[in-house]
Image (cartoon, rainbow, N blue to C red):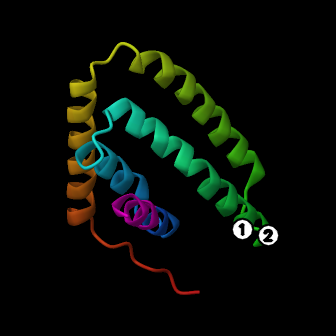
Amino acid sequence: MMTYVAAFLSGLLGSMGFGGGSVLIIYLTLFAGTDQIKAQGVNLLFFIPCAVVSVIINIRNKLVKYRLGAYIVLGGAVGIIVGFFAVRHIDTSLLSRLFGIFIFAIGLVTLFQKPKKRSAK
């Protein structure tokens, strides 16, 4: 049951732009006993259907800039290849610590970030 709750929260937060993958990775590593690399792999697989739905919705709403999207996809593909080979040489405990530092840093930036001023339309 806890797995379903974690998956639901992860999907809900991810769809609202809050980084639901962090919830899923934290659940899998701390409560389900999954090692960090497998948890991040599951998170990436979980992300694919969410991303596909988001892209379809944004295409229908004519919010996609195809040229920019092509650069992002190319950069993502390069990142996947580099990450795939790099993760083989990184110890799981180091990867867990790096992930924790990353989440902490994102939290600090979010906490102390000044709100953007909205432009009048």
Query: What segment carries the magenta color?
Result: 1-10
Left or right, 8 with reference to 107: right
Cα distance in 3D space between marks 2 and 1: 5 Å
Q: Residues within 10 Å of mark 2 (few under 14, many from 20)?
A: few
Q: Is residue 51 magenta?
A: no
- Is the C-beta separation of discs 2 and 1 under 8 Å? yes
Q: Position of residue 70 (x, y in %)?
A: 72, 41
Residue 112 lies, with reference to residue 25, above or below; the image says below
Residue 24 lies, with reference to residue 85, above or below; the image says below
Q: Position of residue 41 (x, y in %)?
A: 47, 36
Q: Position of residue 45 (x, y in %)?
A: 55, 43
Left or right, 114 with reference to 19: left
**What residue is rendered at 59% in x and 86% in y?**
121
Quickly name the residue at label 2.
60
Which of the two residues, 32 or 84, is positioned nearer the viewer here? 32
- Total marks in image: 2
Q: Quadrant of residue 102?
A: top left
Quickly name the residue at label 1.
57
Q: Is residue 4 magenta?
A: yes
Q: Quadrant of the N terminus?
A: bottom left
Q: Residues within 10 Å of mark 1 (few under 14, many from 20)?
A: few
Which of the two residues, 93 or 19, is positioned nearer the viewer here? 93
Residue 68 lies, with reference to residue 97, above or below; the image says below
- Amino acid type, mark 2: Arg
**What residue is rendered at 55% in x and 50% in y?**
47
Which of the two residues, 33 or 109, is positioned nearer the viewer here? 33
Task: Determine whether the residue tagged by mark 2 lies in a helix, strand or loop.
Answer: helix
- Amino acid type, mark 1: Ile
Residue located farthest toward the bottom when viewing the structure as drawn: 121
**What residue is rendered at 35% in x and 47% in y?**
25
Our reading of the magenta stretch's main secondary structure is helix
Left or right, 100 with reference to 21: left
